[in-house]
Image (cartoon, coloured by chain):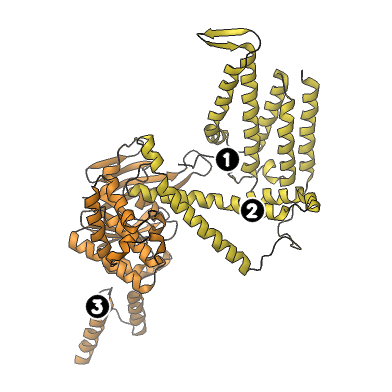
Amino acid sequence: MMEKMIIGRYVPAESVLHRMDPRSKLIIVFLFVAVVFLANNLWTYLILLGYTLLMAALSRIPARFLIAGLKPVLFLVLFTFFLHLFLTKEGEVILEIGWLSIYEEGIRQGIFISLRFFLLILITSLLTLTTTPIEITDGLEILLGPLKKVNFPVHELALMMSISLRFIPTLMDETDKIMKAQTARGVEYSSGPIKERMKAIVPLLIPLFISSFKRAEELAVAMEARGYKGGEGRTKYRQLQWKNTDTMMILLLLAVTALLIVFRG
Amino acid sequence: MDISLQNVEYRYSVGTPFEHLAIADVSIDIPSGSYLAIIGHTGSGKSTVLQHLNALLKPTKGTVLIGSREIKAGRKEKNLKGVRKKVGIVFQFPEHQLFEETVEKDICFGPMNFGVSEEEAKRRARAAIFQVGLSEEILEKSPFDLSGGQMRRVAIAGVLAMDPECIVLDEPTAGLDPRGRKEIMDLFYRLHQERGLSTVLVTHSMEDAARYADEIVIMHKGKVRKKGSPKEIFSVPAELLELGLDVPEVVRFQMKLEQTFSTKFEKVCLSQDELTDMVASYLTGRTSL
């Protein structure tokens, strides 16, 4: 059922993006999130679109798969589009149907904001598609390192993140298994009236909760048994390596930013 | 009710980079009232085959016949409840599917989903709990207060209470102690014999396959490698060992015996009694010489 969803999933492949240091990828994504808001006219949006498509191409992830995987979020994008389309009341009236009127600015805003939204989702998806969860947490732990000085629990946060990311696929598998077991006992998950389907969630959620709690306890015991006692003095098995490509990619984004500043209206 | 798989192929995650072929060109017939064992390595496609038996998975190629219902690749299938009522599946670690407040409610859950009245469901729950060798008091308890072995039995009772015509077992004894293992396997065999329940057993245990099944299917890398009666399958142990599969202990013992005394018995024995008789007659035959 969830096998088409790509958000948060890693696809192993050989590509420039896959080989990059997670730190540079994280920096780029954060920077991109800020930079997106610089765009405010046709040219700047085209530049952003071009940049994002270039990144998607560099990731070597099949376009067909990307598109199919983004379908579930398309709803949100469309929702944003219509929200802006109907609620913006500026510029000339273009269309009037009864009490509903669509303004020029509404179309503009609708397209731009939903495009912005789409680009953000695409870039962040590319991050998770090309970086293993472990790499992401490693990168984040180092990037947040300076916060340790103000007693922010960076290591614990990274550990929590890596544990939860690690168990997403396990939880998905388990959901699938229990769903099948209950389907075999006569529950309908994919058809039937909404009310029935809502009720069907209970026999799915309770077993999931129970096994998650059990697993958390087992994990805690296993960690303690192996002498885990937090981040102090812990060495790293995986060493991150900053390469030339990483610097280049950051420079590329900075160049894009400069272009945006020049072309924005 | 007969079940038949005809040239079934199944691919997971079609159209994504995760796409992979799980089973290909699998044809298996399960006539009404038979006991079939499917053996093979982890990843050989056993579990995928099993999920086709009540349309949890729909083939990407080929046809599955369940009674009079035909499930064909590339067609949208609606209303599969009828099929699922007739084929009960006991999944691996079935205790994970328990969720109700009391054991009784959990056992009634399946039958009531298939439109059985509450009264009838309760009657069936009572009958099922005895069948799996538990006592009546347990019906009022929470399933989560039970021991692992008891939970397993309750979950099995939940499937039995659906009153299926065919029961599919996916390693039903995994993680149980030897005694519990034998009790559960004997329970299913009794049901098979008394009620004529068609049974499909997916297992790693060659012992169980040899002891209970009428027919054995060996899966290897998503394909049916061999089909036959236990005698036929285990009479060529070398072939099984080559696939990395084991043979029952009795057969291994017989092989050793034959090797040591450089002789060959006339048939392969699948139980200790059979082998003892064989050895006895062989010895008496020799002494009379």
Which residue is denoted by mark 3 in the rendering?
B274
From the viewer's side, name the closer residue of B235 and A2. Answer: A2
Q: Which mark is residue A160?
A: 2
Question: Label 1 is placed on what type of residue?
Answer: Ile
Q: Residue at the spot x=39%, y=39% of the render?
A: A197
From the viewer's side, name the closer residue of B119 and A92. Answer: B119
Q: Residue at the spot x=40%, y=66% of the render?
A: B148
- Structural distance between the alpha carbons of marks 1 and 3: 59 Å
**Where's the C terminus of chain B, which quadrant?**
bottom left
Chain that is coloured orange in the picture: B
**Few, some or many residues within 10 Å of mark 1 (<14, 14–19, 20+):** some
**Picture quadrant of residue B263:** bottom left
Numbered disc 2: secondary structure: helix
Question: Label 2 is placed on what type of residue?
Answer: Met
Q: Which mark is residue A7?
A: 1
Discs 1/2, front = 2
Numbered disc 1: secondary structure: loop
Q: Tag 2 or tag 1, which sits nearer the N-term?
A: 1
